[in-house]
Image: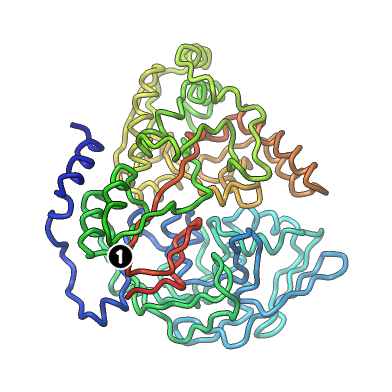
Amino acid sequence: MDRRTFLKTASGAGVLAATGGLAMPALSQGAAAKTLRFVPQANLANFDPIWGTQYVVRNAAALVWDTLYGIDDKFQPQRQMVEGEEVSSDGLTWTFKLRSGLKFHDGTPVLAKDVVQSLKRWQARDPMGLMIKAIENELAPVDDRTWKWSLKQPFPKMLLALAKNNAPCSFIMPERIAKTDPFQQITEYVGSGPMKFARNEWVPGAKAVFEKFADYVPRSEPASWLAGGKKIMVDRVEWVIMPDAATAAAALQNGEIDWWETPLSDLVPVLKAHRDINVDIGDPLGNIGAFRMNHLHPPFNNLKVRQAVMTALNQEDYMRAIVGDDDKLWKPLPGFFTPGTPLYTEVGGDIMKMKNVAAAKKLLAESGYKGEPVTCVVAQDMSATKSMGDVTAELLKSIGMNVDFVATDWGTVGARRAQKTAPGQGGWSMFHTWHAGADCLNPASYTAIRANGDKAWFGWPDVPAVETEVANWFSAKDLTEEKAAMDRLNKAAVENVVYVPTGFYLGYQAWRKNVTGVVSGPLPFFWGVSKA
């Protein structure tokens, strides 16, 4: 009996709900109503939202650190920490001013010098930050609440860069912390966001705790994604790490947890049938599965080897491994951008429809592949990455590749994928991840599509044709020019196999009915969520 069949059988028989209580402290009725217990998508193994790009870190960071601007549910940047901004008539000088009364969790005021140092650290790791850095004259404080950004040429998408929700977001930290080398992890977690991180209660692999920050002053506008008034309605949010789906399902049914970010789709019918549980699509913009390759080392530094994988890959195998039998939850994706959005394109994507193992074997032979091990670093503590990894192991073997399968956890994947050493020396050949559809609307927020070599995302593709079209999209004068650039960009990304999309899919979230204020979006938003 496979795992999916077991889970469905166990759920239907009520076994999950009878697996016994979890080792959690008992809470009084009042304390329980003020404590929200949440099961995140993965373990919070590290907590530096600039050093890496893991969604689980970004999601936790959105509680602790605030941003200058926040993206709303219309994908528009709105003021958050700033009171206002001015841009010169030539577009070369931006002047920003902070809201008054902003405080860090250690009681110190948020000052312009903190903002400037935070932006400098963010710039070193973010594609849009690097673009601004390349045309920057000066980024400096003017006074305690004001700073200026002087540029050599206009950058019209400045506010989008500062508001975007894809990692790394431009979170603002105290100057002393922001001075940490951006390629080294911070060790102090002080922000000015609506919740404080309870460092003394953090047990990686078990739990992370966030406490309401009494001195946080929300904006007056209604909350909308990362914008507006972030009003925290509970005293504590406890992230309880439960990589096993059966355990999490039992805990939700028993009321031992309140909210589960990513329930396994096979268990959704059982959860929907429970009278005390709500289930809904977590993010209507969905996710793009990713087979990410290392372009620096054999075998995937060879274009024909990457093309062989793309030729053989059957997205349906991956999608059914993730979402099961529900055809409404997935669709094939012969491209890199979010389906159903204005700039979606399939130009150049025919190779992704081939699913041709024989043709893939021919390409592999032509590549001169010498049997080098393919070090597949696959996280086992998230159902999506584990499911994709199992399919990949069989796929690579089917076309004649030598698979070195490294089963590990998501925290280790996050650390190992940053290594540029060869696969046999602690590096890697490929890993699986996914990209939120909200991050893949256009090149501005799509870190994984960039192909600017050492400055690119993990895998470090170097494809000038892709970067040319990214620049063309940024300089486009209207939607027609944007669409033309996107068509050419998609074609270049396919031909050079920046990475291999494994399909587009939706996922569920589930929460107890005594919890209100849960909304759909690209990350879990805790503001406005209350518990009876």
- What residue is shown at x 46% (from left), y 65% (from top)? 525
- What residue is shown at x 32% (from left), y 71% (from top)? 36
Callout 1 crowding tier (Cα within 10 Å): few <14, some 14–19, many ≥20: many
* Image quadrant where residue 449 sits: top right
| In-image side of 208 versus 131 (left or right) | left
Residue 13, position as x, y percentages in the image: 15, 45
Q: Is residue 87 above or below residue 124?
A: below
Q: Is residue 300 above or below residue 226?
A: above
Q: Is residue 193 above or below residue 14?
A: below
| In-image side of 319 versus 495 (left or right) | left
In the image, 153 versus 40, the foreground residue is 40
Label tally: 1
Residue 40 visible? The answer is no
Residue 457, position as x, y percentages in the image: 54, 46
| In-image side of 397 versus 441 (left or right) | left
In the image, 526 versus 170, the foreground residue is 526
- What residue is shown at x 40% (from left), y 79% (from top)? 212
Q: Secondary structure at mark 1?
A: loop
- Amino acid carrying label 1: it is Asp
Residue 34 visible? The answer is yes
Its colouring scheme is rainbow
Q: Is residue 340 above or below residue 82?
A: above
- What residue is shown at x 81% (from left), y 48% (from top)? 478
Residue 343, position as x, y percentages in the image: 68, 43
Looking at the rendering, in which quadrant would you find the N terminus? top left
Residue 349, position as x, y percentages in the image: 61, 27
Per the image, the residue denoted by label 1 is 258
Looking at the rendering, in which quadrant would you find the C terminus? bottom left
Determine the residue located farthest toward the right in the rendered image. Answer: 89
In the image, 497 versus 139, the foreground residue is 497
